[in-house]
Image: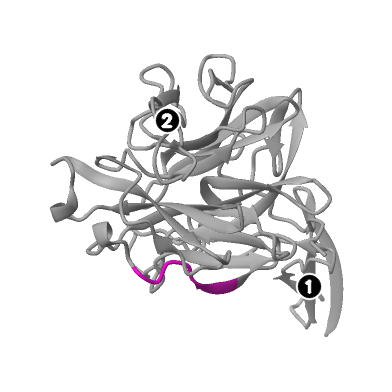
Amino acid sequence: MSMNFLNARRGAGALLTLALVACGDDGGGGNTTIPIVTPVEPKANEYMNPVLDSDFPDPAVMRASDGFFYAYATQTTGIRVQVSRSKDLASWSSVSEAMPTKPSWASESQNFWAPDVIERDGKYVMYFSAQVDASKRARPDDGFCIGMAMATAAGGPFVDSGAPVVCGPNFTVIDPMAFDDPQTGKRLLFWGSAGSPLLVRELSADRRTFAAGSSATPVVSVRNGGPSGYDQGLIEGPWVTFENGFYYMYFSGNSCCGTGARYAVLVARATSATGPYTVLTDGSGVAQPVLQAGGKWLAPGHNGVIKDAAGAEWMLYHAIDSSRPNLIPGNTDISRRPLLLDRIRYVNNWPVVGNATLPTTTPQLRPTALP
């Protein structure tokens, strides 16, 4: 028996194939070749997706003054609000339960979604979505609310402020994202889902309430009718950045999870944080995804954006691994969504993510680590 190592290419990446050649008398003196595929291993200066191979849906990310990046995520088995930290965005370690005590207005809820954290004035401020207790509803049709909690450390423990910031029917009021406008200094809160428009409203100085005289303003709406696209039915998960003189609003559309999940990241841009925003389209009015399903990764979306220590921009997002799609074996309704990472670049002042809208599946250069 002899062994030969063969290099085979698949797309942009190389796979190392081990071929076992068994020699024997088959009547014709032929050989039998049995290929065995060995997974590619990234080098020390590289990473491969996923960067966190556990359920970590709806990620938000921030750089803290303690010298770490922190990522926060929706509940998973046994944890209400997830938090992990990293020096380089590619290697993550779990920190703790970020909010060990439930808010008094959501004491019966098992649904705590899409936390977002900012650091301001030596404190950490978390906005999160939770299902309000039936006995605490201000209106009969209230479903989910956005709450606000504070901590003195990025990993928590976060303590709820005592009352929701805003509530709404069904799950229209979820997926908060706090954004301090670098041009006006205004404190803004974005949110939205469940067929409603994505909204923005100015916060007051205490960040617990809205500014006097402010109102919720629609910035991007669900598209109704016309050709099929990711921007129909549902849009959610807004994330706003300011780059190249534009405000970019990333958001996700369609169905995030479960059987038939069809999710993707879309983008709009504006010259003002509160809009009007222009959605990137394919020319026919259908929103053009900047990140969509590819390879084994299904339904990528609900992203956060952050710069590494060298100023390069990266997107963290969740996706469903088609080889292991369910969080609970046999239960197709609850998807397992690991954490992925891909670089953002710009062409004609529009972002391009990953492998030309697809999650990368081969080794990539690591982000520049924090000191």
Residue 103 is left or right of residue 271, and the answer is left
- Is residue 74 inside the magenta stretch? no
Residue 179: % across, % down: 56, 39
**Residue under the image location 47 percent in, 69 percent down:** 157
- Residue furthest out toward the top: 284
- Is residue 97 inside the magenta stretch? yes
Q: Reply above or below: 7 against 136.
A: below
State which quadrant residue 4 falls in. Answer: bottom right
Task: Check the picture and name the quadrant holding the C terminus.
Answer: bottom right
User: Mark 1–mark 2 contact, CB under 8 Å?
Assistant: no
**Residue under the image location 43 percent in, 57 percent down:** 149
Q: Which mark is residue 1?
A: none
Residue at mark 1: 18
Q: Start and end of the magenta stretch?
A: 94-101
Q: Reply above or below: 13 against 262.
A: below
Residue 87 visible? The answer is: yes
Between 339 and 34, which is closer to the camera in this rendering? Answer: 339
Helix, strand or loop at label 2? It is: strand
**Residue under the image location 47 percent in, 38 percent down:** 189
Q: Reply above or below: 22 against 349.
A: below
